[in-house]
Each structure stands twice: as C-alpha cells, then as structure tokens.
Image (cartoon, grey):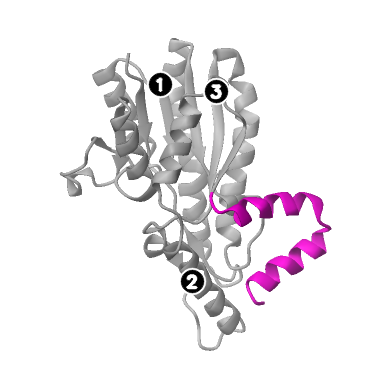
Amino acid sequence: MSKVVLITGGSSGIGKSIGEFLSLKGFTIYGTSRTPERYPDSKFNLVKLDVSDTTSIHEAVSAVIAKSGRLDVLINNAGAGITGPIEEIPDVEIQRNFDTNLFGPIRVIKAVLPQMRVQNSGLIINVTSIAGYMGLPYRGVYSASKGALELITEALRMEIKDFNIHMTNVAPGDFATNIAAGRYHAPIKEDSPYKKPYGDTLNLMDAHVSEGKDPLLMAHAIYKVITTKNPKIHYKVGEFMQKFSIVLKRILPDKVYERMLMNHYKL
C-alpha cells in the first residue's frame, strides 16, 4: 500500500522538491499551500492549509484522511525566515515568526496524532534548521524558533512512543530556494547603530542562500528517513562546515565559539 504523506509548505522550495521526489517513489503526496489555486501545474495534490489557522489545519487533515483513508507521514516543512537586530524587530513580527515556525507545526502535529493513534503507526518529520543549534547574529529570532521546535520534538517523541508513532528532526543548512525573498527583513535604518554590521551580515546571508545546495538533496534525505525502520532523533543536511559547526559548538568553550561566529560574519 502506498504511504500517504502530508507536506506543509509544499508549493515551492524544499517542500516542492520533497513532494515531487516522493511522488516518483510511489508515495501518495498531499502538499499544502495557503493559496493552492495559484499552482495549477503542481505535480502532486495541493490542499489549502494555513499553519496559523487551526480550523484550516483540521479541514485539510480531515480532507486527506477522507480521500485516502489514512495518513502515514507528516512533514512539517512550512516555515518563515526573519532577520534584523532583535532590538529593532517589531514584537508583532517576532510573534508572527514563532507562530509559523513553532506553534504552526505544533498545531498540525496535534491534528494528525489522533489518526496516527488509530492506525497504531505514523511518522512525523519536523524540518528545522542548522541555525536552530546556535544563536546567530541578526538571525536570533529565526534561530530561537527553529531551536524551540528541535526541543519540542525531543520531548514529544517520548510522549508518543507508546502509540508506535515516530518523530524526528531534519535540519537543513543553506539551500538555493526563495526563502530569502519571503523572509521578513527588519529595515536597515540610516540612524541605526546596527546599520553597517546588519547590512553586511544581510548581504552575506543572502549570498549563502543563493549559493546553497540543491533542494533535491533534502528530498533524498527525507526519503531515507521515511524508509528507515527506526529513525534517529536528529538529522543534519547541508555543507560539511555547516554541519561541523554544530560539533564545534559542543566541544569549544563558549567564548571561543562566539569569536568564531563573529569572525565568520566579520563583526
């Protein structure tokens, strides 16, 4: 029987690549978008879902179950970028980012767990970020929201273990997607004390994304997780140095690691 997979944020970028690749592997794919009508040429089913709207989530999940009779894999991929000096990012934007990157995935998880419990099986993959393993300058809000999702996964996977439901994190590094275009950028203010370091860091971040890996690499990694009998808690996908930076954070003194980051960002 073909596994039924629900991918949030499936209309572009990493989510689209995952959906197309898994479709070729014979999975039944349902991607989500807030505006699925804008993607009539999608190579897999797209359903309307907004991770900030609980009613929207339950309607989408119910529609998938009604059509396919089950739900085997949830890939929490929908997310949003945000940059800026924390002092200057409006509170409403910080809250909006956490609503998308943390509370949104939690809402979708809550919506699918009852069906997976009935099935006595299921897999939930939370797409986090290598940035979630460290506090990055001018990306602190993003790092915090993704890092929080990593910890939620660690806790929740123990709570659902008795129901034969697995949960894991897959943390990508920089990939060549349109995330930079959709990211909230705090404006670079002429009179801001952060004008130069923030502006320079923003240019560096955008260059990393545009020069990033092909999202198909994430699709291969997700496929490997789905076809693994007992997935690990954490996976990292990206450039060697991005993954190695997590190892360095574990072994280096805090201030040495901080200096390494500051040198990288030329701060």
Question: Is label 1 or label 2 in front?
Answer: 1
Where residue 72 is drawn, which disc sits there?
Answer: 1
Amino acid carrying mark 2 in the image = Ala
**Which portion, as a residue range, is magenta?**
238-267
Sequence-first tag of 3 and 2: 3
Image point (29%, 43%), residue name: 33
Distance of mark 3 from mark 2, alpha carbons? 37 Å
Question: Is label 3 or label 2 in front?
Answer: 3
Amino acid carrying mark 3 in the image = His
Sequence-first tag of 1 and 2: 1
Q: Quadrant of the N terminus?
A: top left
Distance of mark 3 from mark 1, alpha carbons? 10 Å
Name the quadrant containing residue 241: bottom right
Q: Secondary structure at mark 1?
A: loop
Residue 266 lies in the magenta stretch: yes
Image point (46%, 35%), residue name: 222
User: How many residues crowd mark 1 within 10 Å: few (<14), some (14–19), many (20+)?
Assistant: many
**Which residue sits furthest front?**
240
Residue 206 sits above or below residue 53 on the image: below
- Give residue 238's position: percent from left, percent from top: 53, 50
Amino acid carrying mark 1 in the image = Asp
Where residue 186 is drawn, which disc sits there?
Answer: 2
Residue 84 sits above or below residue 101 on the image: below
- In the picture, measured across the screen, residue 95 lies left or right of residue 19, that is right
User: How many residues crowd mark 3 within 10 Å: few (<14), some (14–19), many (20+)?
Assistant: many
- In the picture, measured across the screen, residue 240 lies left or right of residue 4, that is right
- Give residue 137's position: percent from left, percent from top: 63, 67
Sequence-first tag of 3 and 1: 1
Distance of mark 1 from mark 2, alpha carbons? 39 Å
- Which residue matches tag 3? 166
